[in-house]
Image: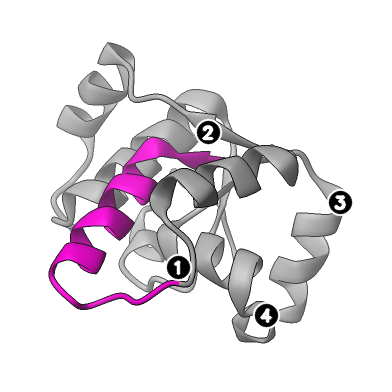
Amino acid sequence: MILLDTCALIWSLFESDHLSTLARQALRENDRAVSIASLWEMSIKITLGKLHLSKSITEIAKLCEASGIVILAITPEDCEVIQALPLIHKDPFDRIIMAQSIRTGADIITDDDKIRQYRMIKTIW
C-alpha cells in the first residue's frame, strides 16, 4: 500500500501532470490510501482561502472511494507514533501522515523534503 500526502492527493485527483513519473507509476501499481488528516487540512486551507477546488470535501472523499483510495482514520496508535517522531517536521497533518505510514508500513508519495529526512519512512517521488 502507498499513502498519498495532501498535495499528492490533490494532484492525483485534479492535476496529475504535477506528479513525478515514479509517483504516477506507484499510483497505478499499488493499493492506495490517504489520511483523513489530508481532507481535514484541505478543509482548513479552503476556509483560509489558500486552496481552491472545484469539489467539496465530501465530494473529494467520495471521489477517493470511487477511485479505490482508502481513507484512513486517525487511531490512538498513530498518536503514540507521533510522540516518538523527531521534530524535524512540525506540521501536524504531515506528522499524522508519517505516523500512519510507519504504523501501516506504507510508503508515502510526497515531494516534501522534510518528510524525506525521516530515515524510517520510505518516500516515493
Which mark, residue 29? 3
Q: Which residue is mark 2?
A: 71
Answer with left or right where residue 47 lies relative to residue 51.
left
Query: Is 70 covered by the magenta stretch?
Result: no
- Tag 3: residue type? Glu
Left or right: residue 5 versus residue 22 is: left
Say which mark, if any, is on residue 18.
none
Secondary structure under tag 1 reads helix
Q: Is residue 52 magenta?
A: yes
Q: Is residue 5 above or below residue 11?
A: above
Q: Position of residue 32 (x, y in %)?
A: 68, 42
Real-space Cα separation, disc 2 to disc 1, in angstroms: 15 Å
Element class at badge 4:
loop
Query: Can residue 125 be seen in the rendering of this structure?
Result: no
Foreground disc of the pair 2, 3: 2
Which mark is on residue 7?
Answer: 1
Q: Which mark is residue 20?
A: 4
Q: Which residues are magenta?
A: 33-53
Name the front one of labels 4 and 2. Answer: 2
Count all numbered tags in the image, as a single digit: 4
Q: Position of residue 49 (x, y in %)?
A: 18, 77
Quadrant in which residue 70 is drawn = top right
| Alpha carbons under labels 4 and 1: distance apart | 12 Å
At x 74%, y 46%, the residue is 67
> Residue 119, percent across and down?
42, 52
Mark 2: few/some/many CA within 10 Å (<14, 14-19, 20+)? some
Seen at 48% across and 29% down, the residue is 72
